[in-house]
Image: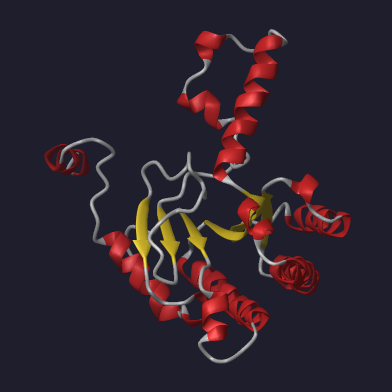
Amino acid sequence: MLNIPQHIAIIMDGNGRWAESRGLMRFEGHIAGIETVKTVIKSCLDTQIPVLSLFAFSSENWLRPPKEVHFLMQLFLETLQKEVQELNKRQICLHFTGDRQGLLPAIQEQMHYAEELTAGNQALTLNLALNYGGRWEIVRAARCIAEDVRAGNVEIDSINEQSFGQYLATRALPDPDLFIRTSGESRISNFFLWQLAYTELYFTPTLWPDFTKEEFEKALVSFQERERRYGQTSQQINELNNV
């Protein structure tokens, strides 16, 4: 398969609606969504996509009903505990992006353990955004730069897009090439606001638990059919490709 994205970022939306449409409790949709996560991870491994980012829990999700928030936190913890050995066996490197201080100590400890265990793996980097918000990340980066400037470690004139990016939580990862959002919503919802500047956006009405391998492949085909110009003209891109 030609023109494989190096980094795919996904908002896994529609678990609750999937459950409600079947007369189930919302939490059953979140459980069903875990199977889709496994499907997408396998597809990335099969297609040799280096980085996959999943928006697991946004900083705004704390506004959901307390019972649902508690369930989501416990589901994340239990799933991570259950799956980390298998992920390590498949040579998957786990990375977490977000404000860890707002999470339960048990979750923080399990995240640290998972990162340490899988640090040397190279088949796929699985980046899970938990208690994450794009604005939080940018404000955090700005504060870190301000502290370095005040300490005399950084000159103001040296700050540019490249250096700013080094203060982001995702500085070790390439910017996403392809963004996917399920469930029919057509917005990025405070996810990777800086990183999505030149990312190809793909929206599908399919609810996350129904997002199959075939749906994933449709998103890849859509990506491959697009021309990424980064501000240049089509003629310029063609000339560069023919060099």
Total label count? 0
In the figure, 191 relative to 169: above or below?
below
Where residue 114 sits in the image (x, y, percent)? 78, 58
Q: Quadrant of residue 180?
A: bottom left
In this picture, residue 99 sits left or right of residue 138: right
Instruction: Write the residue at 50% across / 67% down.
Output: 44
Of 172 and 97, nearer the camera is 97
Residue 243: image location, x then y, percent: 19, 39
Q: Position of residue 189 (x, y in %)?
A: 49, 53
Rendered position, 30 above or below 148: below
Q: Nearer the viewer, residue 237 or 190?
A: 190
Q: Position of residue 116 (x, y in %)?
A: 80, 52
Of residues 243 and 187, the one drawn nearer to the viewer in this rendering: 187
Q: Which residue is depicted at the point 79% across and 67% down?
A: 77
Q: Residue at x 59, y 47 (%)?
A: 133
In the image, is residue 226 above or below residue 32? above
Give the left or right position of residue 189, taking residue 89 as reference. left
Question: Residue at image x 62%, y 53%?
Answer: 60
Residue situated in front as seen by the camera: 204 or 22: 22
Which residue is the extreme one toward the bottom?
23
Q: Within the image, what quadrant is residue 23 found in? A: bottom right
Q: Is residue 197 left or right of residue 122?
A: left
| 179 sits to left or right of 52 | left
**From this viewpoint, is residue 234 visible?**
yes
